[in-house]
Amino acid sequence: MKFDFERGKQQLLEWMDNEFDCSYGYSLQYIKELSTIADIQDEVESFRRFEESWVGKTVAINRARTMREVFAALQDTAIEDDDNFIIELFTTEQ
């Protein structure tokens, strides 16, 4: 196994983009099911906060120069405790 930091960051960012797209779709679907303007406004605000957090995490990963910085950027995400998945993104077979 060979460690490839830049390739791993790119794969991680692609995974994050996919997760963002899924979250966006779920949020839109949820909004369609809401019945009051107040509920819609709450969901829009909630997604805006999620989007701001996501942007911050992707910027932090883009700027990361160490695995420690990558792991720090992944706090409060679906994969923050899935070390094996994260490490697999950064390794290649050779």
Image (cartoon, rainbow, N blue to C red):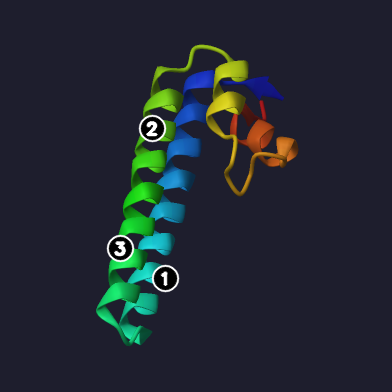
Residue under the point 40% across and 53% down: 20
View extreme (front): residue: 38
Say which residue label 2 marks.
56
Q: Amino acid at mark 2?
A: Gly
Quadrant in which residue 53 is drawn: top left
**7 to 33, vertically: above or below:** above
Classify mark 3: residues with Cα within 10 Å, few (<14), some (14-19) or many (20+). Answer: some
- Label 1 sits on a secondary structure element that is helix
> What count of labels does the image hold?
3
In the foreground, 49 or 23: 49
Mark 3 and mark 1 residues within 8 Å of each other at the beta carbon: no
Q: Amino acid at mark 1?
A: Tyr
Quadrant housing the C terminus: top right
Q: Position of residue 7 (x, y in %)?
A: 49, 27
Q: Position of residue 40 (x, y in %)?
A: 30, 73
Mark 3 and mark 2 residues within 8 Å of each other at the beta carbon: no
Residue under the point 47% across and 17% down: 64
Say which residue label 3 marks.
44
- Distance from the alpha carbon under mark 3 to that under mark 2: 18 Å
Q: Position of residue 81 (x, y in %)?
A: 72, 40
Mark 1 and mark 2 residues within 8 Å of each other at the beta carbon: no
Decide which of tag 3 and tag 1 comes sooner along the chain.
1
- Label 3 sits on a secondary structure element that is helix
Classify mark 1: residues with Cα within 10 Å, few (<14), some (14-19) or many (20+). Answer: few
Residue under the point 74% across and 38% down: 84
Quadrant in which residue 34 is drawn: bottom left
Q: Which of the labelled discs sits on residue 76, or is there none?
A: none
Quadrant housing the N terminus: top right
Decide which of tag 1 and tag 2 comes sooner along the chain.
1
Say which residue label 1 marks.
26
Q: Amino acid at mark 3?
A: Val
Query: Viewed as shown, does residue 22 lie left or right of 52?
Result: right
